[in-house]
Image (tube, rainbow, N blue to C red):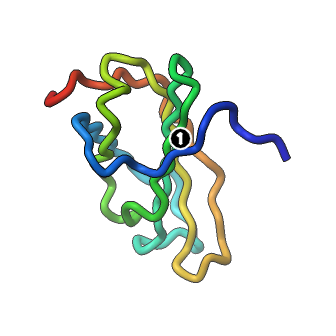
Amino acid sequence: MQSLPGKSNKPPTETQLKQQIKWEDQVASVICKATDKATFIVYNPEKKQFVTFQDIAERGNKAVLLRLSKAFANDQVHVWMGHVDVAGDNVSTSVYFGKVSSSSPGG
């Protein structure tokens, strides 16, 4: 298994950047539930760092506000999302949201 380059960080406790992500379920499935937990990975290639947000929202929320370190200000980051059911038995494939420009501090 290949690891991601850079340093793995938990979401910082003191943050200045907020990144809202919204999604819609693309395919109806009997294994997709509104209570599935969403996990996000945000990778900053310029800083060679990534941050994971595990179980930060439920599938049914269809939106989340990620709080990023102010060190990511004005950088382009890559964002991925995946879901896991409540029991932890079923895991979705990840979805790549593409490059996202992080806001300036306070923005």
Could you tell me which residue is drawn at 54 percent across and 37 percent down? 50
Q: Nearer the viewer, residue 10 or 102?
A: 10
Mark 1 lies on residue:
80
The image quadrant of residue 84 is bottom right
Q: Look at the picture and state if 94 lies above or below 16.
A: below
Instruction: Report the residue at 85% width, 47% height from top.
Output: 1
x, y percentage for residue 96? 55, 36
Most foreground residue, 14 or 52: 14
Furthest residue to the bottom?
87
- Report x, y in % for residue 89: 67, 77
Hey, which residue is sitting farthest left in the picture?
Answer: 106
Left or right, 9 with respect to 100, comes to right
Q: Quadrant of the C terminus?
A: top left
Picture layout, residue 95 above or below residue 39: above
The residue type indicated by label 1 comes to: Trp
Residue drawn at the location 75% of the way across and 41% of the way down:
3
